[in-house]
Amino acid sequence: MNTNSWLNPLLEKKCSGTEGCGIFAKADIRKGERLAIFGGKIMLIDEMYEIPAAMQRFTMQIEERFVLGPASAVPEDTDFFNHSCDPNCGFSGQVFLVAMRDINAGEEITFDYGMTVSESVGSDMVFKMDCRCGSPRCRKTITEDDWKIPELQNRYKGYFSQYIQEKIERMNDNTSGK
Ligand SMILES: [Zn+2]
């Protein structure tokens, strides 16, 4: 169920006992198609400590100081997009998820959490996650510094969360001596 977010009706949540839940394509999807719009409650990163531990993973960083957190105690379908180190989706702005390439019916819809996380400001919270996505590109550990990796900056150009895309442009302006 979705009350605060929008999930494209071409997608569905599926769960299995061993793999957990994910979001899958019910039909072929074209590159550029809008697949989800994330909603919720805007929180300072430290306010994550105040929500139940089980809900803390359903937050998404949208700026150096802010996350989009759950607006209720019940997760929404849009909370179940899994990370992949070789994803088929990325961001337009901070809250629109779009297809980075054509996607076939049956494929799992994924984005790279490195597209949204960066070092938090005003909080000691650090993002670090083990990954076993199985891709040959798997980084094994996903961190809040991954947006600084040049190969990812190239591969995800224009698909990072807007605030990170701007950080990348500032960083690259500085290193090119402008
Ligand atoms: Zn991985």
Image (cartoon, rainbow, N blue to C red):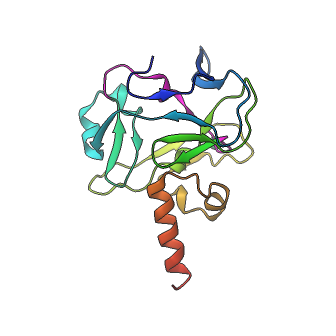
Which range is magenta?
A: 71-88
Q: Residue furthest bottom?
A: 177
| 118 with respect to 150 (left or right) | left
Q: Quadrant of residue 156?
A: bottom right
Residue under the image location 54 percent in, 73 percent down: 172
What is the x, y in percent for residue 52? 29, 27
Residue under the image location 49 percent in, 23 percent down: 77
Q: Residue furthest top?
A: 17
Q: Quadrant of residue 67?
A: top left
Of 118 and 134, the residue lying toward us: 118
The image shows residue 161, relative to residue 48, as above or below, that is: below
Queried whether the magenta region covers residue 98, the answer comes back as no
Rendered-image quadrant of the N terminus: top left
The image shows residue 1, relative to residue 38, as above or below, that is: above
What is the x, y in percent for residue 134? 70, 37
Of 82 and 99, the residue lying toward us: 99
Q: Quadrant of ligand 1?
A: top right
Of 13 and 58, the residue lying toward us: 13
The image shows residue 119, relative to residue 83, as above or below, that is: below
What is the x, y in percent for residue 169? 51, 68
Q: Quadrant of residue 101?
A: top right
| 84 with respect to 101 (left or right) | left
What is the x, y in percent for residue 120? 35, 54
Residue under the image location 35 percent in, 33 percent down: 40
Query: Please, what is the dominant secondary structure of the magenta stretch?
Result: loop
Number of numbered markers: 0
| 38 with respect to 18 (left or right) | left
